[in-house]
Amino acid sequence: MILTQSLLEEVQSFVLRNELMQIGSIAEEPAFKAQNALSRVVPLVVQSLLGLSERVSGQEVVWSMAHDAAKSEVLSNPHKVLYANKSISDRGAKLVNWLLGNRYEASLQEIVVTTGIRPESLSDLVNIVVPVTLGVLGEQLAEHHWSAKALSQWLHSQQPQPVSGRGLPTLVTPTDRAPSRGRPTAIASRWLWVALVVAACLIGYLLGYQPTTEQAPVYPPSASAPTAAVPDGPWDANNPAALLANGSYSKANGSYIYDRAGVPVVLKLKGGVRQIIGANSTENKLYQVLVTPASGIAPGARNEWITFDRIYFESNKAVLTAESMWQLLNVASILLTFPSAKVQLGGYTDSTGSVLVNNRLSTARARAAKATLVKFGVDSTQLEAKGYGSRYNIASNTTEDGRALNRRVSIQVMN
């Protein structure tokens, strides 16, 4: 979709031409009030996302949400996504609330007073505008193949101009905040990222919302999540990794792409965070180890390595790609739920290249994953990072699939 108007105008136009203000409590409002409120809500949402993109690693969070939006039906079938169960999910408003903090209520009250719209109708409007805005961003992302930085730069060019008085509330960006001293800064930063983890997890299933998704099973500590039947491996039938990986090598990014995440499960985490992930995913495997008492785990199982199945690096570099942030956000929220857990991140390479170079690269990649988890709020004392180079290969190095499987970062629960 090539925009012929600004982001703000496109979002407003999409809401109007798809009659999205004819659902929920907004339908009961006079048209002029609803449209007046819409013209104020869209800039509020855009500036909220812009503020997020200006935070540390916030560009990757916005990119991930927009990327997921591009794969959803929020633009092709908005009524299904937004009003699937005859009610509008409140997750969009929660996201804006987390981003604005104590400015959220004041901003909405300003719009209520200015436009005369009811508070419940305004909340419904925010819950519609957030996924639509992410959907439009996702379309632009897919159209132009933007990186997280490029998307952020374009978003910055689309920001509305704040007005005084009873117009759009001026948002405070991170550089506007008065500096604080000592530990309070670290604490505030940590809890900011806790909120962003929660927000990203909620948006992840907001955009692909299905009524049955909420009923996905939650497995208690005493039960193991079912796994899909293991098919014949695509190569090297004597190699366990070939049989269990369920995926294939991608020439596009030079990585191994894992398939068959398994049946959906819901993880209930600290602070009401809910993750909907696959039973075979890295997140669920890690969670099952952490949530199960030591007496309930088979000998040696707690110290088994769990391979990240959705994080990738630029070729021959220790630079994480933007799409890796989603799984790292998920893992961060799990580790925040178990603050006493100690885990180790291990980096590995294939056997090509020199031993010295492989050891350096694997160490740098493990440390990059650790640094990202710390940015997402995990206490650095919970994490260790070590590189193992080409030792401990899990697959044959004679094929592209095998070498891609060996280039990995894994996580191990130490305590």
Image (cartoon, rainbow, N blue to C red):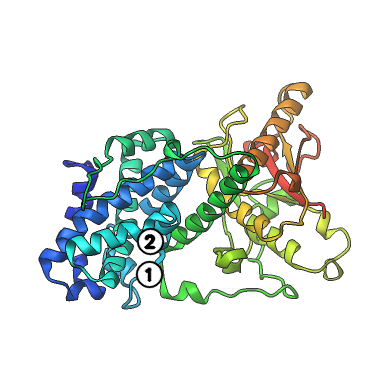
Residue at the right extreme of this rendering: 299
- Name the residue located 73 percent from the left edge and 36 percent from the top edge: 348
- Name the residue located 51 percent from the left edge and 52 percent from the top edge: 196
Q: Distance between the residues labelled 2 and 1?
A: 7 Å
| Residue 258 percent location from the top left of the image | 59, 50
Residue nearest the viewer, comparing 91 with 278: 91
Instruction: Specify the amino acid type for callout 2.
Output: Gly
Specify the label residue 92 is tagged with. 2
| Residue 385 percent location from the top left of the image | 75, 39
- Where, quadrant-wise, is the N terminus in this rendering? top left
- Name the residue located 62 percent from the left edge and 64 percent from the top edge: 270
Residue 89 as seen in the image, left or right of residue 361? left
Q: Is mark 1 on a helix, strand or loop?
A: loop
| Residue 96 percent location from the top left of the image | 39, 56
- Where, quadrant-wise, is the C terminus in this rendering? bottom right
Residue 77 as seen in the image, left or right of residue 226? left
* Cβ atoms at labels 2 and 1 below 8 Å apart: yes
Residue nearest the viewer, comparing 317 with 180: 180
Residue nearest the viewer, comparing 148 with 96: 96
Label 1 crowd (10 A; few <14 / some 14-19 / many >=20): some
Can the viewer see residue 18 in this picture? no
Residue 296 as seen in the image, left or right of residue 57? right
Q: Which residue is the site of mark 1?
A: 89
Q: Splitting the image into 4 quarters, where does residue 398 fall?
A: top right
Can the viewer see residue 37 in this picture? yes
Instruction: Specify the amino acid type for callout 1.
Output: Ser
Specify the label residue 411 is tagged with. none
Q: What element carries label 2?
A: helix
